[in-house]
Image (cartoon, grey):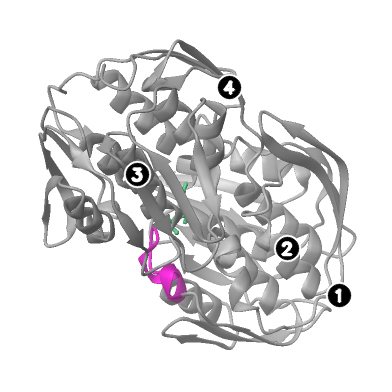
Amino acid sequence: MVRSFRVAPGGALSGALRVPGDKSISHRSVMLGAIAEGVTEVAGFLEGADAISTMEIFRALGVRIDGPSAGRVTVHGVGLHGLRAPARPLDCGNAGTAMRLLMGLLAGQRFESTLVGDESLSKRPMRRVAEPLAAMGARIETRDGCPPVRILPVDTLRGIRYRMPMASAQVKSALLLAGLYAQGETTVIEPAPTRDHTERMLGGFGVAVARHGAEVTLRGGQPLRAAAIDVPADISSAAFFLVGASIAPGSDLVLEHVGMNPTRTGILEILRLMGADIEVRNEREAGGEPVADLRVRAAALRGIEVPPGLVPLAIDEFPALFVAAACAQGRTVVTGAAELRVKESDRIAVMADGLRALGVDATPTPDGMVIEGRGNRGAVFASGAVEAHGDHRIAMSFAVAALRAAGDVTVRDTANVATSFPGFEALAHSAGLRIESRERA
Ligand code: S3P
């Protein structure tokens, strides 16, 4: 079955809505809850395929998990050493976060396990995690650096001090989770700040994690104590609406309870540099994470050179930002974003192809893109069809592009939208996007 979106042109986004729960925090809530002592109650859990994969994997590792039901999940923790050998390979589906973090968590276990994934995940690089884990004493086999990943039992790991060659929260998190099972201290040094949910949440579970500048350190053997987790709405899912409302004249939209962790808000800073009108309201804290409501209104955007320092803080939002750039006055240049080439798809190549198919002058570069904005008035995108290549964020980005198209936009291969944003079509439709979902054999 192939799913696609057909989106009629024009319209504006309005009203108030809450997008689903944060994917990064949802994965971690199950992982940390599972190895904690006691019962962890999660609210606002993302009931998308990625986080569900993580849940199923921990069930296969012997953890009792109730839910999800209306965003509520209960994880009956088994403690650091309570996981059991799985009977089958553990299927991470499309979820790179599940696979990489699990590599770290499983590396220190006394049983063997194998991690597998779907077609997209099976092409993604795992050496970035396998190599530093091997330096900790883990025994990990990959197929030419890609999944499946086989993790052999070890007695113990040893802490290391590791300077990451790329800014990756998944690599950092994998090493910190392995560090829980290691003798001595594990230190990870980041070349640039990346999302810090693992460190924050470990703190919430009672683990002492020290941060000195770019270094994060924890000592092995510390037990986790169950905690209540309130998952905020995912700013990465809000991004499609932030861009959609910015580019569609007449839009005035409120996004509620959005996670505002400063390692995730690069999208707001970049859109503001482009001239977006985003008001942050009701700033508060929920479960150790800052949250706020965001009011976004249509604005005249201008092209910018995106500061490379903001790239890791908005890494998942570039597909949407490329659409915003096409609707801006002047040229936008993105550099320092080579990591986009190893996401759920090669997001530089796939976005450039799609933008060009819709008549936009977009030039891919090894580490970014140059986009000639077509201005703030009238249609920007030609009517046409684009391929999402099974990448959820590509699919949703081109769906909102239709707000400024001259005719219908068809987006093919959209089933994976459900990995991060179940119910996207209905929510977007209720806000004013003229979207329709189709399925054919
Ligand atoms: C994530 C980290 C990022 C991000 C991904 C989620 C996480 O990946 O792209 O969607 O939850 O740690 P990298 O660590 O590969 O940058």
Q: Residues within 10 Å of mark 2 (few under 14, many from 20)?
A: many
- 383 up-or-down from 13: above or below: below
Amino acid type for the residue under numbered disc 2: Leu
Residue located 54% across and 33% down the image: 203
Tell which circle, 2 or 4, labels the residue nearer the N-terminal end: 4
* Comparing labels 3 and 1, the label whose residue is closer to the camera: 3
Sooner in the amino-acid sequence: mark 3 or mark 1: 3
Residue that mark 2 sits on: 403
Gap between marks 2 and 1 measured at Cα: 15 Å
Q: Position of residue 163 (x, y in %)?
A: 37, 64
Q: Number of labelled discs? A: 4
Q: Which residue is mark 4?
A: 71
Q: Report the magenta stretch's main SS.
A: helix
Mark 3 or mark 2: name the one nearer the start of the chain.
3
Find numbered disc 4 in the image and state the secondary structure of the residue it sits on: loop
- Horizontal and vertical percent for residue 202? 49, 33
Can residue 406 be seen in the rendering of this structure?
no
Q: Which residues are magenta?
A: 338-348
Residue 60: image x %, image y %? 24, 21
For mark 3, give the secondary structure: strand
Q: Secondary structure at mark 1?
A: loop
The earlier-in-sequence mark between 1 and 4 is 4
Tag in front: 2 or 1 = 1
Q: CA distance from mark 3 to mark 2?
A: 51 Å
Say which amino acid is labelled 3: Glu
Q: Which residue is mark 3?
A: 185
